[in-house]
Amino acid sequence: MTVRRLLARGIAVVSLSACTHVVPVPSPLQYITARHPDRVWVTRSVTDGGATVQLSQPRARGDTLVGLVGETLEAIPVAAVAEVRARQAAPRRTVALVAVPFATLGLYDLVASALRPYQVPPVGIPGGGGCFCNLDSICC
């Protein structure tokens, strides 16, 4: 398989997936109600143990976050939460991840064409083989 095909396949795979990152959410109840994420990471306050748990299928019920921790349904009061983090799209990372392979492919083509030996196309065949150009009076 050529380098070009490998790069093209790599670009296709990267283009089909978007980059994400996990960031703190400023208003957990509003975020969960508006965005309906698959999961969030909840860090409990220090007075409540300070542990971070992954809350799957989170829902807002009044002033409480409800969701699955493992296979157990848990309710965590917002007052007992230090931070909630959620996965969000990272468009700059996605653009960079797509642009770098395209730039690499372009650079590869540029270097490959510069290193390829230059070949002069045939103009005519001596001995009456005909002329391959439109300038009959000059080349034949």
Image (tube, rainbow, N blue to C red):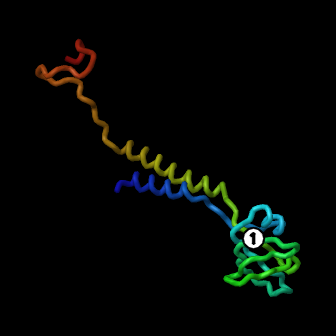
Q: How many marks?
A: 1
Does 75 sit above or below residue 102? below
Residue under the point 57% across and 59% down:
17
The image shows residue 26 at horizontal and vertical percentages of: 83, 66
Residue under the point 74% across and 82% down:
73
Q: Is residue 24 left or right of residue 100?
A: right
Q: Quadrant of the C terminus?
A: top left
How dense is the environment of label 1, judged by Cα within 10 Å: few (below 14), some, or many (20 and up)? some
Does 35 sit above or below residue 136? below
Residue under the point 70% across and 75% down:
56
Q: Residue furthest left?
A: 127
Q: Quadrant of the N terminus?
A: bottom left
Q: Quadrant of residue 122?
A: top left
Q: Which residue is mark 1?
A: 85
Q: Nearer the viewer, residue 69 or 88?
A: 69
The image shows residue 66 at horizontal and vertical percentages of: 78, 76
Amino acid type at image mark 1: Arg
Q: Nearer the viewer, residue 78 or 9?
A: 78
Q: Is residue 129 left or right of residue 34?
A: left
Residue under the point 76% across and 84% down:
51
Query: Tag 1, which secondary structure?
Result: strand
Q: Is residue 20 left or right of residue 41?
A: left
Does 72 sit above or below residue 19? below
Q: Nearer the viewer, residue 102 or 86?
A: 86
Q: Nearer the viewer, residue 59 or 137?
A: 59
